[in-house]
Image (cartoon, rainbow, N blue to C red):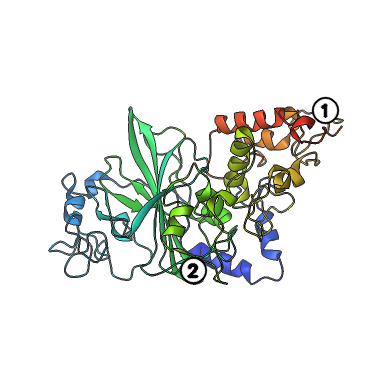
Amino acid sequence: MVSRTSGHLFLLLSIMSGRTWQAVLASLLFAGCGGCGPGGAPGVDPLPSPDRLGPAGAADATARGAATDGRAGAATDGRAGAATDGHAGVAPAPQDGPPCKDGDEDPLDLRCTGLYSDTGARSLAAGVREFKPAFELWSDGAEKTRWIYLPPGSTIDVSRMNDWIFPVGTKLWKEFRMPVAGESRRIETRLLWKTAEDRWTRATYAWSEDGARALQVKAGVPEVPGVPGYAIPAQVDCIRCHAGKTDNPLGFEAILLAAPEASGLTYAALADLGLLAAGAGGPLPGAAALDVPGTATERRALGLLHVNCGVSCHHPLGVATHFEMRLNVDPPGQVAGVRGARVYQTAINQPAKLRPSGAPPEARYYRIRPLDPDRSAVLYAMSRRDPPGAPPEQMPPLATRRVDEEAVAVIRAWIEGMTPAAGYPRAAP
């Protein structure tokens, strides 16, 4: 996630005429994969060092005196975990003030974001709820946990069911874990925080190797110690995908929360709690009407393409509109069947510009060619990772160095099952 600096870039692009800002972003990206092309980080941030924390766990110990106002580790003087010298167990005391400050919209310490009431025990703060979308963005095999906080008394505006608008004060966190020495280790936690109607703060917090503290990193960590091949992206990279939504969150949306595979704070739970509101005040569609269509293989394929490609980039308001992979909720409040899906309509038998290196000049490639995964450019892009300096061809194109082999197998099986008897057109020549 990116800091407010990249928000200024987005504002500049937004005021350009028409869709010029999308063309600007798209020029930076792989045309077949949308607005998420790789970008160089301006520098490298180190991971938080345990020796900055004093005795093991000292930072967490001061955070356990949480006040009843729901802020993580808030002390009586209004600062989270404030010690007698104004610092939470940090030695030596830095010169830039306490680790948590009232009104800070870009906190340097994860403890100051309001996720936990007890950081050491990982106890969630009041009002923070866990959720798990039905289909997940690929993150090189990382385990992920997600949470959301909605201000008391607020609702999410779902007047446009494909593009929810969140109330000011909304916060979302996503924690990434990877196996290290046989154990699951926290690597990073990302924050999205809506601080004004037109502004989101985005921040990434890297966990120290001992798991005692998570501090903000802006330039990213290209090689996380102990986790070969895993990188924490620079915060400026995140706008490339999050700009594909009117409001920033990608994984907290109708289709991903309505499908039966979702858990925690699902679409049905949100509706039951009165947290969803349509502008016209009409009834909300039921969760079943928003489910991903098709057979088990079709559902899995459409869901994976929706979350990895469609939500952020391949949709009518994204930066990759030449073909679409987002599942849409129609105005009557229902998701169309497989043949009504935009990926079916805009990708199957449609010529592709992307060609594998070494392909014969006369060979024709398509975005998706029924029964022929080897001439389907979508599968080719999913099956590769770009070597350094190579033209961008991989998909997803950002923040991944490893191929999602399971997703590749699912898309291959889907293509191989695209028979006329199953309702698919015959393969183009």
Q: Nearer the viewer, residue 318 or 208?
A: 318
Mark in front: 1 vs 2: 2
Q: Is residue 45 visible?
A: no
Between 285 and 196, the residue placed more toward the observer is 285
Looking at the image, residue 13 sits to the left or right of residue 368; the answer is left
Q: CA distance from mark 1 to mark 2?
A: 49 Å
Which residue sits at x=70%, y=47%?
Answer: 341
Q: Amino acid at mark 1?
A: Pro
Label 1 Cα neighbours within 10 Å, binned few <14 / some 14-19 / many ≥20: few
Q: Position of residue 391 (x, y in %)?
A: 67, 41
Percent position of residue 172, x then y? 42, 56
Task: Farthest residue to the left: give it.
Answer: 84
Q: Position of residue 90 (x, y in %)?
A: 20, 54
Residue 86's x, y, as percent?
A: 18, 64
Left or right side of 281 for 363: right
Residue that badge 1 annotates: 360
According to the image, label 2 marks what residue?
199
Q: Residue 269 sits in which quadrant? A: bottom left
Identity, as a three-letter code, of the amino acid under mark 2 = Arg
Identify the residue at horizontal 80%, vertical 38% (top origin): 349
Q: Is residue 366 visible?
A: yes
In front here: 280 or 344?
A: 280
Q: How many marks?
A: 2
Disc 1 on helix, strand or loop?
A: loop
Q: Is residue 112 above or below residue 255?
A: below
